[in-house]
Image (tube, grey):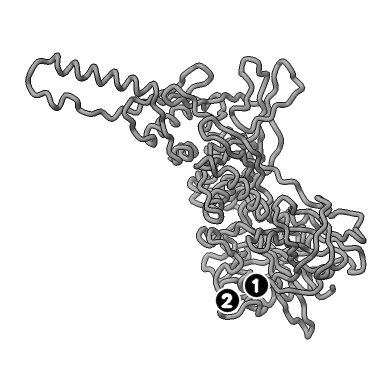
Amino acid sequence: MKHIRNFCIIAHIDHGKSTLADRLLDFTGAVTERQKQDQLLDNMDLERERGITIKSHAIQMEYEHEGQSYVLNLIDTPGHVDFSYEVSRSIAACEGALLIVDAAQSIQAQTISNLYLALDNDLEIIPVLNKVDLPSANVEEVTDDIVDLLGCKAEEVIPASAKVGLGIQEILTAIIERIPPPKGSPDEPLQALIFDSVYNPFRGVETYFRVINGRISKGQKVQFMATKNIYSADEIGVLKLSQEVRKEISAGDVGYLITGIKEAKEVKVGDTITTPENPTQVAIDGFEEVKPMVFAGIYPVDTEEYEELRASMEKLQLNDASLVFQPESSAALGFGFRCGFLGMLHLEIIQERLEREFNMTVITTVPNVSYQAYTRKNPDDIIFVNNPSDLPDPSGMDRVEEPYIRASIITKSDFVGNVMSLCIEKRGQITNQTYLTPERVELTFDMPLAEIVFDFYDRLKTVSKGYASFDYSPIGLRVSKLVKVDILLNGNQVDALSALIHADNAHTIGKKMCEKLRQLIPRQQFDIPIQAAIGAKIISRETIKALRKDVTAKCYGGDISRKRKLLEKQKKGKKKMRQVGNVEIPQQAFMAVLKLND
C-alpha cells in the first residue's frame, strides 16, 4: 500500500486540468502514441465540443521513482460551478490534490471554493502554476497570490506548462513525496466507497469504487449497505485507459466492479460495499446530500414515450448523481418529470445528453427555484413550491420565502461599476468588497437565487468582458413579495409558461413574455390574443393577427353590399374557429422565455 498514491486535479474552468492530465498520462507511458489525443479523459462528444469537463474520470498510471515502482490513481474533475458535486465525490476518494492556477488569470472564484472542499477533507495540496510559457503570464505575482491563499512557501509552488510538457517530472515527484499513501488495512473486513457508476447496455451497471479497508476478489459475494442487496462480483479490475481485469483489489486502490445489475435504482453513489459473511460495522461517511438549485419540468414530445423517458432518466442519474426527479403532470404537456439541477448549464447538459445518448426529444419548461409558502389558516405548515401551480391562493396566503445565496465575484477593478449595477438590478445587496491586488477585486453579494437562474452568468461575462469569475453558496430563506404571472393563449391558461416573479418586475417581465411569444407562435386562421395575468388582472396583451384569405378578390365592380356580405360570412367563420381553435406552441417558445433580455 505504501506505493499507491490517490490524487485528483482541482482548478477553475480553463486553467488546464485536462491538458495536464494528458501530459501526466504521456509521461508515465499510460497511453501509446496511437491512443494520444487532446482531452483524452473527456470521452463524451459533448465535453469535446464545448471544451469543458462534465464528468470526473478515473485512470491508473504506473511510474518508477528512484528505482521503486508506484501506482498513481488520478481523478480528473470538472471546473464549472454546476458540477461541484462531481468534485466533492472525487475528493472523498483521494488523499491529495493538485491545485492548478493559470499564471495569466491568477486565482478565480472556483479555485477557492474547490480548495476549501479539499481542505475540509484533509487532503494534501500541491500548488501548480500552469501556463508559465504564455507571454501574458505573471509568474511572481500569481506565485505570491498562491502563497497568501495556502500559507505555503514560494518554492513549494511548481511552475509548469501542460501544453509544452514543462514541470511534469517535478509534479510526479511531488505527488510521490508529498501525498501520503492510503491508510487502512487489507486484513480488516471489506469497506469500499462507490464514487461513480455508469450504465453499460450489454453488461449492466459498472460501479467505480475505492477500497478503504480489506480486499475484494473475483467471484466473491458483496453487499451494498444502503440497499442491503447481495451480489456476486462477476468481474473486477482497474481503470487504465481501457478496463483491465484483475483477480483481487486490496485496500487503498481504485477499481471497477461488474455484478450484472440491470436496475439503475440499485446502485447509490456514496454507498459502501462490504461482504455478507464478514460485514464492516461502519458505513463510510463524508458524502454530502445533493441540493438542487434549479427546478424545471421535462416532458416527452410524444406522451407515449413517458415510460421510456423514465428509464433514460434513471440511467442518466447513475452517471450523474446530482440529478433528482419526480413525476408530475401538466394540462398543456401531459405527463413528465419535475427535475432538480445544480444550475442552468447542468440543465442544458442533461437535455443534450437525453437527446444524444437516449434519443429522447424532450420539452423543458421555464426553470424556477424552490420556494416556501405559509398560509394564514395554518401558519406552522410549510408548503414547498417547486412549481408555480403549487402556490396557494393569494387571498389566504400569509407570506412566501425565497432562497438567497451569497455570491462571490472576482473581477478586474475596471469592471466593478458594471458588475455592481448588474447585481443591484438582480435585487442583490453588496455585503463586502475586498481588493485582493490593486488590479483584482472580490465582491460579495446577498441575492435571490431566482435572479441568477436565467441569464445572470452570461450577462456577468458580457459586462466584465469575460474577466469575472463567479461562485455561490446558499445562505437560507428570506421573506419576499412574489406573484404568479400566468400566460393565457386565446383565453386558455398555459400552465407550463407560468412563472413566480418578484412583484416589482412582474409588469416588465409579463410584457416581454407576451412580445416574445408573439414572434414565436405561428399565425393561425384566427386572431390569437396573448395575455399575461396576475390572478384575474391582465397586465399585458399582444395579438397575433389572423391569416386572411382575400374573399372579395372575385368581386370586381358591382355593388358594395356583395363584398360586405362575403366579409361578414368570413367574420362569422373566424369567430367559430376561434371558439374551437387549438393553438400549438413550438418548443423554442418554452426556451425563449429564459432569454428575455436578448
Viewer can see residue 128: yes
The amino acid marked with disc number 2 is Gln
The amino acid marked with disc number 1 is Leu
Q: Looking at the picture, how far across and down is residue 348, in whole percent?
A: 54, 48
Viewer can see residue 432: no
Viewer-closest of 510 and 309 = 309
In the rendered image, the residue lying farthest to the left is: 557
Point out which mark residue 102 bears. Answer: none
Mark 1 crowdedness (10 Å alpha carbons): few <14, some 14-19, many ≥20: some
Point out which mark residue 35 bears. Answer: 2
Viewer-closest of 157 and 522 = 522
Tell me the distance, in whole angstroms, between the alpha carbons under discs 2 and 1.
9 Å
Point out which mark residue 241 bears. Answer: 1
Q: Secondary structure at mark 1?
A: loop
Q: Looking at the picture, how far across and down is residue 550, in whole percent?
A: 20, 27
Q: Is residue 277 left or right of residue 158?
A: right
Q: Is residue 138 above or below residue 431?
A: below
Q: Is residue 307 above or below residue 371?
A: below
Q: Looking at the picture, how far across and down is residue 236, in whole percent?
A: 76, 69
Q: Residue at x 42, y 29 (%)?
A: 514
Number of numbered discs: 2
Q: Residue at x 51, y 16 (%)?
A: 536
